[in-house]
Amino acid sequence: MDTKKIQMTTPLVEMDGDEMTRILWKMIKDELILPFVDLKTEYYDLGLPKRDETRDQITVDSAEATKKYGVAVKCATITPNHQRMDEYKLHEMWKSPNGTIRSILDGTVFRTPITIPSIKPAVKNWEKPITIARHAYGDVYKSVEIRVTEPGTAKMVFEGESGKKEEVVIHNFKGEGVLQGMHNTDKSIRSFAHSCFKFALDTNQDVWFSTKDTISKKYDAQFKIIFEEVFEEYKAEFEKKGLEYFYTLIDDAVARVIRSKGGYIWACKNYDGDVMSDMVSTAFGSLAMMTSVLVSPDGKYEYEAAHGTVTRHYYKYLKGEETSTNPMATIFAWTGALRKRGELDGINELVNFANQLEGACFDTLNEGIVTKDLVNLMEGITPTAVNSAGFIGAIRERLEKRRAN
Ligand code: NAP
Ligand code: MG
């Protein structure tokens, strides 16, 4: 036991990954964490070779470990496609690890940009980050469709196990057209609501939720009703912290978001979240600065970067070329996880360390030392682009300075 280092009591679930982010993962640990923390992790290698070797059991095991310990940190991973099948000689086209972990934890993904003064959001009045929570189950993503090619009647039928039957006419087609049937479940919507309110209390932010219940009087209305019901369980705590739950129509929400100062969680239905998260993240600057955390309805946390494995940079790296890949979102996945572990276990030193490491990252960027992706986004400062190792080294220096003070 190294007594000079910060001690941990409960292990973090560490999920390693692929390609360029796997390279960064090791650099971050070696340079920014292991010299300061007597790191305790339960290690799961979610790199594609290991997933294939274990027939993806390792992904399931890592999710189960997250349920057990409560906090995980994940590196970006390859979601196999046909090209990857050949490249890695896979036994099967394994499913997205994020999808597998999300369904085991029944969690919601919250994406938040890391903001700095010299990168101005495209929307000039945004002063604080906007966090988007996307309900990642059902609706159009699990819909069935029919292409109608002749006149006829379309009906929607529900046959209950009790024998109850409900039938509505959707449309009497006079000619060709299209049909779509979608669904959601109260259970999934309820989990989504719990995750949103838990994360709001965790990060001291208001929750905005938006649907189109004036038009969709049963479907979207059910989302609104469930959120109101679930909120009752959190209301007292929200009041104590001076936080608000705010419901409005999706079109009103979009207008208000653009006029707002930011600094809240915007809970979105699946499609709205898909579309709006791309808009909001682009407006804040760079995908490389977007963090992501999966929160389960019972308060388990898995932290990661929102970006992928940065394949294009990895192929350059393999050829021995220099790369300038931005490690910010991956570092913040580590700080998020360490801070949460520290809070849960009552280890102030660990919480302080996470804050210091984030502070050192901001010191570096604010002094104009950046990776290449940020150069053209900076205003009011002349940036110096460095490679990944140089950037991490600059953070290390500033971290040591902060810790010495
Ligand atoms: P990506 O890895 O996010 O990279 C897309 C492009 O965005 C890069 O080529 C790079 O642009 C830029 N970029 C992203 N992160 C960056 C960073 N940290 N620093 C600098 N530039 C960065 O997306 P992708 O190429 O579509 O996907 C690659 C692999 O990642 C795929 O196998 C996919 O399945 C996987 N993926 C995993 C996750 C996850 O695990 N959460 C999420 C998404 C994708 P330039 O090339 O122009 O520099
Ligand atoms: Mg999208």
Image (cartoon, grey):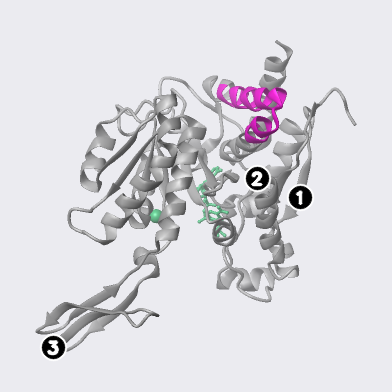
Residues 16 and 339: in front is: 339
Tag 3 and tag 2, C-beta contact below 8 Å = no
Look at the picture and state if 93 lies above or below 79.
below
Please give the label number shown on residue 43. Answer: 1
Quadrant showing the C terminus:
top right
Amino acid tagged 1: Tyr
**What residue is pinned by disc 3?**
151
Please give the label number shown on residue 70. Answer: 2
Q: Along the polypeptide, which appears first: circle 2 or circle 1? A: 1
Q: Position of residue 15 (x, y in %)?
A: 69, 51
Q: Is residue 245 left or right of residue 66?
A: left
Label 3 secondary element: loop
Graded by Cα atoms within 10 Å as few (under 14), some (14 to 19) or many (20 or more), the crowding at tag 2 reads many
User: How far, Cα to Cα, is label 3 from label 2?
Assistant: 55 Å
Count every numbered label the image shows and give the total.
3
Q: Is residue 28 left or right of residue 291?
A: right
Q: Along the polypeptide, which appears first: circle 3 or circle 2? A: 2
Q: State whether residue 388 appears in this view.
A: yes
Residues 306 and 22: in front is: 306
Residue 357 sits inside the magenta stretch: yes
Look at the picture and state if 214 lies above or below 38.
below
Tag in front: 2 or 1: 2
Q: Main secondary structure of the magenta part?
A: helix
Q: Which residues are magenta?
A: 339-362
User: How far, Cα to Cα, is label 2 from label 1?
Assistant: 14 Å
Within the image, what quadrant is residue 141 found in? bottom left
Residues 393 and 218: in front is: 218
Quadrant showing the N terminus:
top right
Q: Residue at x 53, y 56 (%)?
A: 106
Residues 269 and 158: in front is: 158
Tag 3 and tag 1, C-beta contact below 8 Å = no
